[in-house]
Image: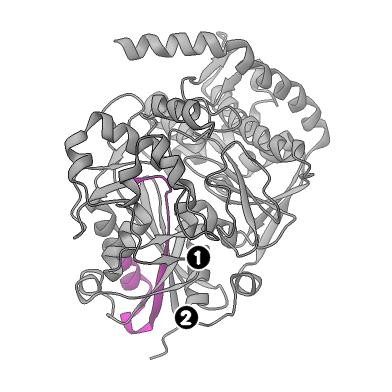
Amino acid sequence: MKRDILVGIDLGTTSLRVGFYDKEGNNHGFSVADYDLIHPHNTWVEQRIEDWMTALGTALRSGMEKFHIAKEQILGLSIGSTCCSVVVCDREGNPYRNCIMWMDIRATKEAEEIAALTDEHLSAEWMPCKLLWLKKNEPDIYEKAEVFCECQDYLTFVLTGKWSVNINTACNWGYNADEKGFPRWFYDKIGLSDAIERFPKENCYAVGDLIGTLTDECADRLGLLPDTLAAQGGVDSSIGILGMGVYEEGKVALMTGSSNLTMLLTKEMMFSESTINAGPHHLIKGFYTSFRGQLCSNSIIEWFRKEIAKETDSKAFFARMEEAVKEVPVGSRGLLTLDYFQGNRHPHYDTRVRGMMYGLSLEHTQADIYRSILESISYGTENLLEQYRKAGFPVKEINISGGTTNSDVFMQIQADVSNVRINVPQDCQSVCMGAAICVAVAAGLYESLQEAVKHMVRYKKVVKPNEENHKIYHEYFKQYLEIYPMMKEWMHKTSDLNLKQ
């Protein structure tokens, strides 16, 4: 039996996706398993760590059965995962608490303290901020912890029995691939000098490196052979860059999902608000990965579906709303929504602001509100693209992936707001595709990530902007930009009232 199936895994925020590919990038099927988020307090988001491997086993077994794929056909696997999802455990991989998820912003004050001490402007999502919060608020757990890592490296340990860091995620904690280490001065200054010793340091891998093979225990649990290869993946957004077909300078990659991320490969560092995670070689050797991100995007749509529309059937909801918003004019009849439901990542680094909606009247319908949310997410993404333009990169086209590609209306709104051409890959599960590309390189099927991308990624359509719609959206976008400076202090004070309760 030919061993030619590459398994690409997307460990997302609320579900895990498994894609089965061959070396030409043809997809032989997808399988999905869901898991839950836990919200202990306002802005806190956690997840049960044991759910990841349970979901992986479920998705693998069901997919192999459904698509008639034998374990003898599977050559290897790789994972694209959420980033800044922090695991605290012992050396045997036993967790001491739930994972503190990437979108958890409980460490807002710690991020502010770090900025004051070091002039490094880190997101409250990132590992150093969360560890500082842990040291202050759960000192017993902090002290007894033997390993601090992200979900990506935790899963590597569970799969292969090897503790390691990978350049792609560890850069967010300050790892420098050229210097092969973390900035001790930074950790000393913020009071976390003891944390560095508990980062996995036995091995360090780059994206597409061969890590090894599965342990017997893990292979049995997943229904795979022990000699199945494990290739180094990375942050879902970075792995998605590959799956969208971006492997050199010139194109912006837009990954849509619970949060939106725009990414660009550059020979020189583009942004410098934080120097400890500047790079280089985050994804592809010789390149910096410049990125701008939204804290909330499609997660706002999910909130609207569950809490406002009260729809339990997501497929029926999206089909209905796709048709309904076509009847709503550009600008949603004067309705303007702010997408800061979990704060703002870029360009403001402000987790004390929240979403809002202006212009509501008794004439507005559910469809108006829904389209306004789609437009607000697109304004937020356009604000990210503006950061590239201000840095000297003319954004003319983007390669896209993720949930937005399921909606022709949503993609047209984004094209119109940003006045850009949108290239849609044939396989829009870009993280699964990107992870399969990592397997192909680790297995020696291709010599480099670039070569693998060229052979495996293809496109199915292009969305072009409507100039008249862009003119209207341009005026709304100017109003959107004025909200933050005008309302910042008011939002801070109002958010603080909630924290005092």
Q: Position of residue 151 (x, y in %)?
A: 34, 53
Q: Is residue 144 visible?
A: yes
Q: Which residues are magenta?
A: 60-86
* SS at mark 2 in the image: loop
Label drawn at residue 443 = 2
Q: Amino acid at mark 1?
A: Val
Task: Using residue 203 as the reference point, say whether residue 408 is left or right of it.
Answer: right
Q: Examine the structure image and report whether residue 70 is included in the region drawn in magenta.
A: yes
Report the residue at 33% width, 64% height from top.
Answer: 156
Q: Position of residue 134 (x, y in %)?
A: 28, 35
Q: Position of residue 39 (x, y in %)?
A: 29, 31
Residue 202 found in image quarter: bottom left
Residue 260 found in image quarter: top right
Q: Amino acid at mark 2?
A: Ala
Report the residue at 61% width, 62% height from top.
Answer: 426
Mark 2: few, some, or many residues within 10 Å (few <14, many ≥20)? some
Disc 1 designates what residue? Answer: 207
Give the alpha-carbon distance from disc 1 to disc 2, as whole Å.
13 Å
* SS at mark 1 in the image: loop
Q: How many marks?
A: 2
If you read the primary sequence from the N terminus, does the residue marked by circle 1 or circle 2 appear first?
1
Residues at circles 1 and 2 in contact by the CB criterion of under 8 Å: no
